[in-house]
Amino acid sequence: MSKALNPQRRVVGDRTVVNRDWIREFTGASVGTAARWYKIRLEQPEEHRHPEKERIDGSDFYDEQQFRDFYTWFQQEKANKVLKADPELYQADPEDVVSINTAAKWLGFSGASAIRKYLKDNPDYFPKPLAEPVEGPTGRMTPGFRVGDLQDFDRKRTGDKLGKAGRRPGPQPGAAVGRPSALEEALAAELSARAGGEPLTATQLAAQYATERIDRDGYHPGLAAQLSEQHGGPQRSWEYVVRTALAHRPAAAPARSEADRRAAVALAALRERGDIRGLAASLAREHGGSPDVWSRAVNAARRIADPTT
């Protein structure tokens, strides 16, 4: 279950400041997007820059007016990057019908495949073709579109980047405002606890966890599943995080032997729980494998912990 937003506004002298949850509610941005706006603030024009954070009662706040100025500039920048429509689009009669190829050309797309992808991945984003196909440039019958529908679509383009499914970031119809990803939901508490330091996205924090585990225990095929169980979030998300961590640390890619890995797990358990009776059996239940195998791992861990034994 996603953590509910807690937007706050406070008056400091003659200014109003807001927290990041207020920013997310106001803009519909995700945790990662809101953090990135702040992280790259020095790359933004000084007169339109995202405000610096102010620490108040243990939480970060931002000047509201400065943020509104930044967001107005940001929206305008996106609008300026919108693909420019061919003037022919508005010279045509709104009731005319054109082929999918002409529609793509007039809207500035690379080809008809872009429209087909929108229709397949997100039918509500792009105007639906008419029931009757029309003749395309090669003489083949192809989907046709009403010019007026294409003009309406072009007027609504804002410059927001589209995701894989053709959805825009921010609030979606019928969805919670600023709904975080499954990984963001799983790491929300830790991200909140680290809010006073350098802003991190959920993926960056997950990469830290994965790198720390690889440094400590080495890589093994079940690492993503273990991280998913320990920190929450889908295993497939952690598999991506682990692959990325390994790609940036080629020296860490070779896996330890299973015996070395079990010894490292047993050593961590020894230090955490002490040399208790039945430790090998407990590790076998927790990690799989036979008690005999884990008994050897516990003995190896004892030798590491106390080389004189």
Image (tube, helix red, strand yellow):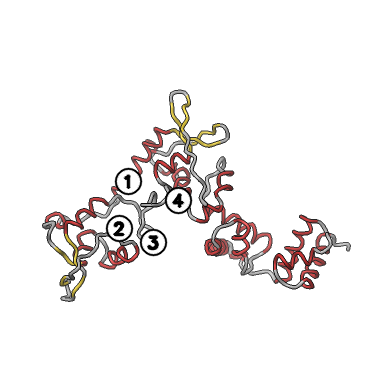
- On screen, 58 above or below 74? above
3D distance between C-alphas at marks 4 and 2: 19 Å
Res. 216 mark? none
N-term mark: 4 or 2: 2
Residue at figure coordinates x 60%, y 64% from the top left: 225
SS of the residue under disc 2: loop
Of tags 2 and 3, the one toward the viewer is 2
Residue 305: x, y in percent?
A: 81, 59
Identity of the residue furthest to the top in this view = 13
**Residue indicated by mark 2:** 125
Counting residues from the N terminus, which is met first, the one under dot 4 or under dot 3? 3
Labels 4, 3: front one = 4
Q: In terms of depth relative to the viewer, which is nearer, 106 or 237?
A: 237
**Would you name the residue on which mark 3 appears?**
164
Task: Provide the residue designation for mark 4.
Answer: 179
Question: Which three-letter amino acid code belongs to the residue tagged 3?
Answer: Lys
Q: Position of residue 83 (x, y in %)?
A: 26, 55
Specify which label sits upstream in the sequence, 4 or 1.
1
